[in-house]
Amino acid sequence: MATITRELLGQLNEKITVVVAKDDYLPSFEKSLKHYSKTANIPGFRKGMVPAGMIKKMHGPAVFTEEVLRTVETQLNKYMNDEKLEIFGQPIPFGDNDARQIDMNKPADYTFTFEIGLKPDFQVADLSKQHPTRYKVTVTDEMVEEEVNRLQLRHGKMTDPETTTGDDNVLNVQFTEANADGSVVEGGISKDNSLLVKYFAEATRPSLIGKKAGDTLTIQLNTAFDEKEREWVMGDLGLDKHDKAAGDKYFNLAITKVGMVERAEMNDEFFNAALPGKAIATEAEFRTAIKEDIQAYWDKQSSNHLQHELYHVLLDHTTIEFPESFLKKWLQVGSEQPKTEEQAAQEYPSFINQLKWTLITDKVSREQNLQVTPDDIKAFAKAQLFGYMGMASMDEEQPWIADYVNKMMQDRKFVEDSYHRIQMEKVFEWADKQVQAVEKPVSVAEFTAEIEKHQHHHH
């Protein structure tokens, strides 16, 4: 029997020594040679009739080394299993392990040493002491009105009037970078766009009334647009919205076409087109449904924000000790591409964060018995499909949907990714129930500012 000993190298870091004796590997070596002589194809000999001595000469040394190493590995794995050792990654062979010591002609006891990093025991942070904020965005009548207007325009009919008459005209325009006097800047920005008249600042709109295709006017971004629309236009022109100087640029605005959207009327046809499958009969019901949709959207954003908070609470308030020197070594040798000591040291902090998060989610899932079932993964695939197609949900019994889901269930990468995402959702649902979240009503602007502040803080 192989003898195996363990000694402590440092915190959660041990050395395992495996000594294999002759009778651990010789029987399997003989067996392998027999197998070789049965199957070897050697010119001049019938299959299975090659003399054993010849086989031993040709293949012996390689087979012998292979059997010794295989025996070491088998014994090491059996030992770790029996001792219930929870380790990170794989055991790392010590540098003084030398396969050249293995000699078929002098069978002996062979010694191999390995280093292992042990998984720590730890307590998940106590979430009941945490009081994160659960933001509740207040949906205003203006927000509902704006969305109703947007949908009426989107589902309206496009007409081609001669001239611009008001806010609802659509202008197809070409922006060309210019100087204040309208002379074109050499090599400047040039871009087509289409804008509603109401996107322009109030002071600029009168100068657009009466304009027709072929007319040009010179504008300055900072004065022609208010902040929200200006950021959007600047982004489209490839300018940085935070760059004060960029907003001072002038452009010639050449109108290539004037359009007009006649808003859709509030009737069954419009309700069905704008909110399919909701069986809406009256304008009041339509507005209520729009309000619920907007609320659901902001509730989801708020829930994502809270999850982000919970992620940081769990990471920051859970203390886990790691076998640092082992893991840095493992980062160097454990991946397909070997890394230098510097690269490993650089990657270590983000690697440890990911590792810590994995240990926390695994422990919570195990202790709270959070199971991810094949049905969960199928539902996830379906939800993703509906998301891609921009549908809320549809007749789920359609055969092509089932075909798509079955195809995805065969895709190993998809199943693994989905498994982790669903597991994480379940961990967050559990965490959400543990904390004492404090609900706080906010406006969209306040909530957006909070999110931006948060992202800034974590970058």
Image (cartoon, helix red, strand yellow):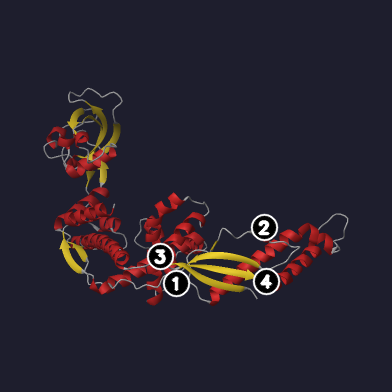
Disc 1 or 4, which lies upstream in sequence?
4
Residue 395 visible somewhere in the drawing: no
Q: Amino acid at mark 2?
A: Arg
Q: Label 4: how many residues lie within 10 Å, few (<14), some (14-19) or many (20+)? A: some
Query: What is the C-alpha distance between the residues marked 2 and 4?
Result: 17 Å
Indicate the secondary structure of the residue bearing disc 4: loop
Q: Nearer the viewer, residue 370 or 36?
A: 36
Q: Which residue is mark 4?
A: 21
Q: Which residue is mark 2?
A: 100
Q: Nearer the viewer, residue 98 or 310?
A: 98
Q: Which residue is mark 3?
A: 322
Query: What is the C-alpha distance between the residues marked 1 and 2?
Result: 49 Å
Q: Which residue is mark 1?
A: 373
Q: Amino acid at mark 3?
A: Phe
Disc 1 or 2, which lies upstream in sequence?
2
Q: Label 1: how many residues lie within 10 Å, few (<14), some (14-19) or many (20+)? A: few
Q: Amino acid at mark 1?
A: Thr
Query: What is the C-alpha distance between the residues marked 2 and 3?
Result: 34 Å
Disc 2 or 4, which lies upstream in sequence?
4
Indicate the secondary structure of the residue bearing disc 3: loop
